[in-house]
Image (spheres, rainbow, N blue to C red):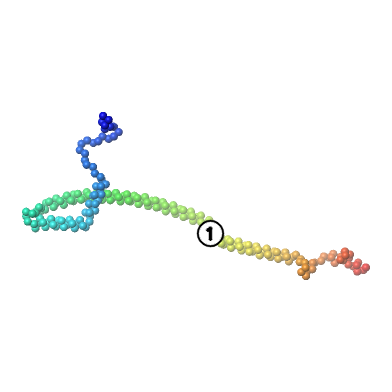
C-alpha cells in the first residue's frame, strides 16, 4: 500500500508507459564517433579500403564461378559501401559538431582571458602613469646633489664673508704690547704723570 502511494505522488513525474528504449551514454558515443571519424580521415584507411576493394574485385572476377560470393555488378559490395557511407556521414557530422562545441568553448575562454588581460594592461598603464606623475614631484639623486652643492657654495661664501668681517673688526681694534702705541687724547698731553699739568711742573 505504501509503495502504491509512493508511486502515485503528484510531485514526481509519472514514468512513461510502453516500450522502454535502451539508454546510452552520449559522451561515450561521441568519443566513439570521433574515433571512427578520425580513423576514416587518415591515409591508412584509404589504402586499406583500396586493397580490400581490389581483392574483392579480383576474387569475384578471377576465382572459379562456384567460389565467387559476389559476381559481376558486385551488388553486395555496392550495398556495403552504401551502408558505410550512410553511417560515416552522420558519424563525421557528430564528430564535427563536438569539435565545434569544443572550439566555441575554447574561443569563449580565450575571449574571457583576453578581456582580463586587457583590463590588467589598462590597470598597469594607469598605475605606471600615476607613478610617473608621483616621481615627477619626488626629488631625484641629481637634484639632491645639485642642491647640496649649492648649499655648500653658499656656506663657503658665508664663511668667507664672516672671515672678512672679523678681519675688519680686528683692524679697527688697537692692539697692545705689539710695538704699537695707543692713540692719545688732547688731555693726555696736558696732564703729568702725577696728575699735575706739565707746564707748571717745569716752571716750578
Between residue 179 and residue 67, name the one nearer to us.
67
Q: Is residue 98 above or below residue 8?
A: below
Residue 180 in the image, given as x and y percentages of width and height = 78, 69
Residue 38 in the image, given as x and y percentages of width and height = 24, 53
Q: Is residue 43 above or below residue 203?
A: above
Residues packed near mark 1 inside 10 Å, few (<14), some (14 to 19) or many (20 plus): few
Placement of the C terminus among the 4 image quadrants: bottom right
Residue 125 shows up from this direction: yes
Q: Secondary structure at mark 1?
A: loop
Identify which residue is drawn at 30% across, 33% down.
11
Q: Does residue 62 appear left or right of residue 123 in this picture?
A: left
Q: Does residue 139 appear left or right of residue 88 in this picture?
A: right
Q: Does residue 131 appear left or right of residue 2 in this picture?
A: right
Identify which residue is drawn at 21% across, 54% down.
40
Between residue 21 and residue 108, name the one nearer to us.
21
Identify which residue is drawn at 39% across, 52% down.
117
Quarter where residue 125 is shown: bottom left
Amino acid at each position: 500500500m505504501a509503495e502504491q502511494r509512493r508511486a502515485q505522488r503528484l510531485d514526481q513525474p509519472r514514468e512513461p508507459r510502453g516500450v522502454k528504449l535502451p539508454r546510452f551514454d552520449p559522451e561515450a558515443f561521441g568519443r566513439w564517433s570521433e574515433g571512427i571519424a578520425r580513423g576514416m580521415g587518415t591515409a591508412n584507411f584509404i589504402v586499406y579500403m583500396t586493397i580490400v576493394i581490389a581483392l574483392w574485385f579480383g576474387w569475384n572476377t578471377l576465382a572459379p564461378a562456384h567460389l565467387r560470393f559476389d559476381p559481376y555488378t558486385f551488388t553486395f559490395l555496392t550495398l556495403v559501401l552504401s551502408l558505410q557511407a550512410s553511417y560515416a556521414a552522420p558519424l563525421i557530422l557528430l564528430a564535427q559538431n563536438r569539435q565545434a562545441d569544443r572550439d566555441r568553448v575554447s574561443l569563449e575562454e580565450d575571449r574571457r582571458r583576453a578581456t582580463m588581460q586587457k583590463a590588467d594592461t589598462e590597470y598597469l598603464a594607469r598605475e605606471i602613469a600615476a607613478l610617473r606623475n608621483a616621481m615627477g614631484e619626488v626629488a631625484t639623486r641629481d637634484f639632491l646633489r645639485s642642491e647640496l652643492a649649492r648649499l655648500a657654495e653658499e656656506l663657503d661664501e658665508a664663511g668667507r664673508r664672516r672671515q672678512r668681517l672679523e678681519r675688519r673688526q680686528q683692524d679697527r681694534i688697537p692692539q697692545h704690547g705689539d710695538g704699537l702705541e695707543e692713540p692719545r687724547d688732547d688731555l693726555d698731553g696736558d696732564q703729568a704723570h702725577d696728575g699735575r699739568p706739565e707746564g707748571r711742573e717745569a716752571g716750578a
